[in-house]
Image: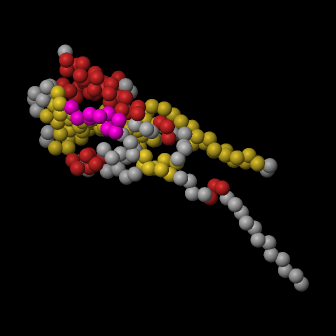
């Protein structure tokens, strides 16, 4: 009696570990100055900043009194919907899947000051499905509050990759600062 053994070697391209790359971006990397001082009360500066972000589609989603003289405001909203379709079709059928992502922006505005002067710090970061990416600028927030962010990783070459560079957030921050400067000049 002869026994035969069949050894099957399966090559699985889907079994290869995808290359996930850390994304660490924020507007602070693209806007040379992120700290400002204005000769107005925090209430006046806050009203202008809130109106400017709201007009751009980024409402206040959170605010926190960090210390008696420091308050954080968080603005967030969607920018774009992205669909990624993957799959294969073979001789005996196939499989196609799609994933949907919402790319947005998250902004933190730190306001402190007295009745006649306000210090302002603005930072913006991209979001994927409402989760902000981490950045090197987060270290500043960690020192003052209980802010926590671990590395954000995206699949290299993913369709959302070109949308999470921090450029859109930097452009928004620049626009808010211009409006604030114009309001201060009045």
Q: Foreground residue, 115 or 184?
A: 184
Q: Is residue 59 visible?
A: no
Q: Is residue 91 visible?
A: yes
Q: Position of residue 161 (x, y in %)?
A: 50, 41
Which residue appears at 23% of the width and 50% of the height? 143
Residue 111: within the magenta?
no
Which residue appears at 19% of the width and 20% of the height? 184
Instruction: State the residue lying farthest toward the bottom.
Output: 1
| Residue 113 versus residue 52 in the image, above or below | below
Q: Quadrant of residue 179?
A: top left
Q: Quadrant of residue 64?
A: top left
Q: Quadrant of residue 181?
A: top left
Q: Position of residue 24 (x, y in %)?
A: 39, 46
Magenta part of the protein: which range? 28-36
**Left/right of residue 36 with respect to residue 85 in the rendered view:** left
Which residue appears at 56% of the width and 53% of the height? 18
Instruction: State the residue lying farthest toward the right.
Output: 1
**Left/right of residue 164 with respect to residue 114 in the rendered view:** right
Instruction: State the residue lying farthest toward the front.
Output: 32
Residue 29: within the magenta?
yes
Q: Position of residue 81 (x, y in %)?
A: 51, 34
């Amino acid at each position: 009696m002869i026994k035969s053994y069949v050894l099957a070697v399966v090559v699985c391209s889907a079994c290869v570990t995808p290359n996930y790359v850390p994304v660490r971006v924020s507007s602070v990397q693209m806007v040379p100055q992120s700290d400002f001082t204005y000769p107005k009360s925090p209430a006046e500066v806050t009203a202008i900043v809130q109106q400017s972000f709201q007009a751009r589609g980024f409402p206040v989603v959170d605010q926190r009194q960090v210390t008696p003289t420091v308050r954080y405001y968080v603005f967030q909203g969607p920018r774009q919907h992205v669909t990624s379709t993957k799959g294969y079709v073979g001789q005996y059928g196939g499989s196609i899947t799609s994933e949907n992502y919402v790319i947005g922006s998250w902004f933190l505005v730190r306001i402190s000051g007295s009745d006649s002067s306000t210090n302002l710090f603005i930072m913006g970061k991209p979001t994927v499905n409402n989760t902000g990416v981490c950045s090197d600028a987060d270290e500043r927030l960690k020192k003052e509050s209980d802010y926590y962010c671990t590395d954000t990783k995206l699949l290299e070459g993913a369709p959302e990759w070109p949308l999470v560079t921090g450029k859109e957030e930097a452009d928004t921050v620049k626009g808010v600062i211009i409006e604030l400067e114009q309001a201060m000049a009045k």
